[in-house]
């Protein structure tokens, strides 16, 4: 049967409406599915995603762990069954501060993150008081709400730039932990010689600075670490390195977490540090996460620094010293 042009057009219009309605229904299903998928990362569940002035902050968890991320960088986390345990191994190495100072009463942490290290020290050492300084107030809120970071007489949280706090505080500390990273960088004013002079003035006699540094011991990715090492060496006569996982056979060129312990006591040998660790372990003075295997990561080789700058307030090019395989573009 022949149809007029009007009939054909009307039929096509009705068909188009039916197709459009079906497309809308499919689109709604897809959008709902995408919305649901946006709440998961692999097997993880996103609890928070928020922008602060300094970071894109994300909190997510799986069946066992909860994690904190700044942009692309994993900052910390906690075991859901025990909030004092971090998924990151370097936090355990900070307890080696006891190898360098016989008594720890007061500790300063610059860079709160998920609060793993303050929580661990508060639990392990009832006599220790901890001050945590964090620049980003949103990070502080996240640490309290999602990572069970306590606050009270034994743990003060100060929202302030770490350098300003160190300069202004009148207190002295047995341990000062430098753990302030954002994304894949480090604030330049926290790694200069002038700042280390201020830090040194806030240590008790025999006190120790513990610095968490991401870098390599040698090779093209080592310039940032070696520049920071050189700058610490200008103010502290005793520098001791624990590259996390070095004993597993990774090359010196591998980017890793390096714990640097800076003191005014030079020349402490591996045997002496091992003996001190043995005494602490036998006396159960350290948490169970610290083991004898940590001494296998102790690095005694010299660090070459002739080709890297001494970092100062006038010259601290931390943004162009390669860490993650990046070099400034060349013609």
Image (spheres, grey):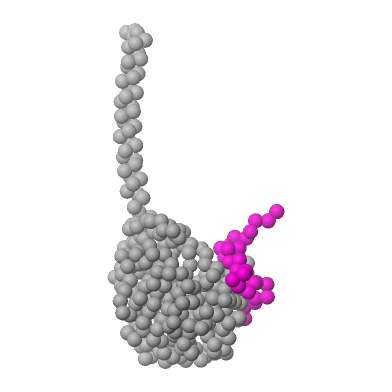
In-image side of 329 versus 37 (left or right): right
Q: Quadrant of residue 97?
A: bottom left
Q: Is residue 234 visible?
A: yes
**Residue placed at 60% from the left, 69% from the top?**
316
**Residue placed at 32% from the left, 84% from the top?**
126
Decide whether residue 304 is among the magenta residues: yes
Decide whether residue 123 is among the magenta residues: no
Count numbered badges in the picture: 0
Q: Quadrant of residue 53?
A: bottom left
**Residue placed at 41% from the left, 87% from the top?**
104
Q: Name above or below for residue 56 compared with residue 167.
A: above
In-image side of 197 versus 62 (left or right): right
In-image side of 250 versus 305 (left or right): left
Q: Is residue 274 visible?
A: no
The residue lying furthest to the left in this view is 81
Q: Where residue 26 sits in the image (x, y, percent)?
A: 32, 36
Q: Name above or below for residue 217 compared with residue 32.
A: below
Name the main secondary structure of what is drawn in magenta. Answer: loop
Q: Where residue 310 sits in the image (x, y, percent)?
A: 63, 74
Q: Where residue 306 sits in the image (x, y, percent)?
A: 68, 75
User: What segment carries the magenta color?
Assistant: 302-331
Q: Where residue 193 sits in the image (x, y, percent)?
A: 58, 76
Specify the quadrant that holds the N terminus: top left
Between 28 and 182, the one lying in front of the other is 182
Between 86 and 305, the one lying in front of the other is 305
Between 107 and 290, the one lying in front of the other is 107
């Amino acid at each position: 049967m022949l149809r007029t042009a009007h009939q054909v057009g009307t039929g096509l219009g009705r068909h188009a409406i039916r197709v459009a309605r079906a497309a809308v229904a499919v689109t709604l299903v897809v959008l709902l599915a995408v919305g649901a998928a946006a709440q998961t990362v692999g097997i993880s569940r996103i609890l928070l995603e928020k922008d602060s002035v300094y970071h894109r902050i994300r909190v997510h968890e799986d069946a066992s762990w909860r994690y904190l991320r700044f942009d692309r960088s994993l900052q910390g986390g906690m075991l859901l069954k025990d909030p004092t345990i971090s998924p990151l191994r370097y936090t355990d190495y900070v307890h080696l501060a006891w190898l360098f100072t016989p008594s720890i009463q007061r500790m300063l942490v610059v860079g709160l993150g998920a609060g793993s290290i303050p929580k661990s020290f508060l639990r392990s050492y009832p006599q220790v008081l901890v001050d945590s300084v964090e620049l980003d107030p949103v990070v502080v809120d996240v640490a309290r709400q999602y990572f069970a970071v306590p606050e009270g007489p034994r743990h003060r949280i100060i929202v302030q730039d770490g350098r300003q706090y160190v300069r202004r505080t009148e207190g002295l500390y047995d341990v000062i932990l430098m753990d302030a990273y954002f994304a894949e960088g480090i604030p330049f004013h926290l790694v200069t010689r002038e700042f280390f002079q201020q830090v040194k003035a806030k240590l008790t006699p025999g006190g120790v600075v513990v610095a968490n540094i991401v870098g390599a011991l040698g090779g093209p990715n080592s310039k940032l670490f070696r520049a920071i090492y050189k700058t610490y060496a200008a103010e502290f006569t005793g520098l001791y390195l624990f590259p996390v996982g070095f004993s597993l056979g990774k090359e010196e060129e591998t980017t890793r977490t390096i714990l640097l312990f800076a003191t005014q006591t030079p020349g402490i040998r591996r045997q002496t540090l091992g003996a001190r660790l043995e005494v602490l372990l036998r006396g159960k003075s350290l948490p169970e996460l610290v083991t004898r295997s940590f001494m296998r990561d102790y690095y005694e080789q010299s660090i070459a620094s002739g080709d890297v700058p001494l970092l100062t307030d006038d010259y601290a090019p931390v943004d162009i010293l390669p860490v993650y395989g990046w070099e400034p573009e060349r013609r």
